[in-house]
Amino acid sequence: MTTHEVFNQVPPLIGHDVADDPALLDGIFREGGGWAAEAVHELGRLAGTEQAREWGRLANEHPPVLRTHDRYGRRIDEVEFHPAWHELMRVAVGHGLHARAWTERSGAHVARAAKFYVWRVDAGHGCPISMTYAAVPALRHAPELARRYEPLLTSDTYDFGLRTPADKRGILAGMSMTEKQGGSDVRANTTRAVPQPDGTYLLTGHKWFTSAPMCDVFLVLAQAPEGLTCFLLPRVLPDGTRNAIRLQRLKDKLGNHSNASAEVEYEEAVAWRVGDEGRGVRTIIEMVNMTRLDCVVGAAAGMREGLIQAAHHAAHRQAFGRYLIDQPLMRNVLADLAVESEAATVLMLRLAGATDRGETAFKRLGLAVSKYWVCKRWPAHAAEALECLGGNGYVEDSGMPRLFRESPLNGIWEGSGNVSALDVLRAMVKEPETVETFFDEVGLASGADARLDAAVREVKDSLADVATIELRARRIVERLALVLQGSLLVRHGHPAVADAFCASRLDGDWGRAFGTLPAGVDFAAIVERARPKIG
């Protein structure tokens, strides 16, 4: 005898094309990556399969394990991963989500950002993928090293294992900057770099966060005789011996469980200088800026994932005699989540396009502003999307708790909120041309919406009070981000989305939580764009 019948349950969100996203597709054509549309769809269809989702689940439920010694007591400093992790990495590298964009045609960074955005079945494995992408421009400060390693970094082959890079078909790059006493203040680093007669350096010190310690090479900051300097540090030396890199422990993190983040010690580890002595921050900042771009892309991707999960649930779940998606208040919540998601997507594609076109001045300010704001918005967005599923969303099986745990990371990685906000002020003071270029971009929508025009005037006026500008940095950066998003949506977005954004985010006809859009919004048009199409 059965005790209950299962009904009014939502079917799994499986079998859809994750790339079936109007804001994404319009954007990749507009920004010059349209030639890769079919490849983006191919990866999007794979991301929507049950197999890919299972890889993401397994990689997180079976996190990496540190093996410091073998059975005989010899140090091995290895990290062991579940097979699902390797499948995720194989797909990511095979589809060029790592460094291939540096070798491809115009629009390659837009195409790569779109792929990174749709392959969102697991955030953790995106870390080594992102750092490998970001390592190339920094490594080019050492042309001989770039000649040797760049072909391996851009290879489409995922070749896991501890071997000499020259003997591998493809390699991955990590980053090691942060130390326990300095945190974001990397100039306080104490790791020493002693030059050797053969041109190498011996590094001794401790790093508090080494991202993805199983990578083949790392960009590392250390104090050389002339000051803080950037170095390339391989795990295996050219003669096949292991470098003196000791993994102390893996971090027990809030989220990002599939990815290994380690504390390491260098005991006269051999490294090669990248860039001039004393110019380490300026050298590695190129890597940092590219990973900051991926923070924006990843946050936009996370918002889209939360949105479609919420919309899918609401389309199939009934309460009080109607489907949730047909109930006015839920439509308001879903539309508000959709507006936030589309604003993030159009912005991340604009930044990727700026990378392709070498728009250095615009990207300098635009990226710092976007890193602050889009990453700040994701946790609130994830929490609201989870709540749309009610108690079901709080259960691990739904996948929403994992999404929620991931959401704070991008705001912390590569500079938390205050670091990003102060970086914006620094750029405005030291590189005033970035301010002019930023407002030139925003001004392309001038006259199209009075609410946007008023917001632009307001933020320009706010810059005049220099005495309190640092105290107000977060508010200033927030408004800069909103006028940039508003400008892009007014020019390129769906009219209903642009109108809702300007009414709420710019004109203030909005509450304090998602789901407080004004009554005049075209809810039907916005929500329909958000619904994933299965089959």
Image (tube, helix red, strand yellow):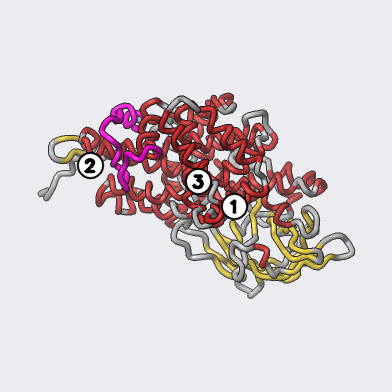
In the image, 26 versus 366, the foreground residue is 366
The answer to whether residue 364 is above or below residue 491 is: below
Furthest residue toward right: 197
Specify the segment rendered in magenta.
506-531
The residue under the point 65% across, 36% down is 101
In this orientation, which residue lies closer to the viewer: 438 or 9? 438
User: Could you tell whether 100 is left or right of 38 in the image?
Assistant: right
State the quadrant of the C terminus. top left
Dot 1 and dot 2 residues touching (CB under 8 Å): no
Q: Is residue 31 above or below residue 308?
A: above
Q: Is residue 310 magenta?
A: no
On the image, the x and y values in percent for residue 374 come to 47, 45
Q: Is residue 128 visible?
A: yes
| Labels 2 and 3: the sequence-earlier one | 2
Mark drawn on residue 423 = 1
Nearer to the camera, 430 or 37: 430
Q: Residues within 10 Å of mark 1 (few under 14, many from 20)?
A: some
- Tell me if residue 171 can be seen: no
What residue would you read off at disc 2? Answer: 9
In the rendering, which numbered label is found on residue 174? none
Disc nearest the viewer among 2 and 3? 3
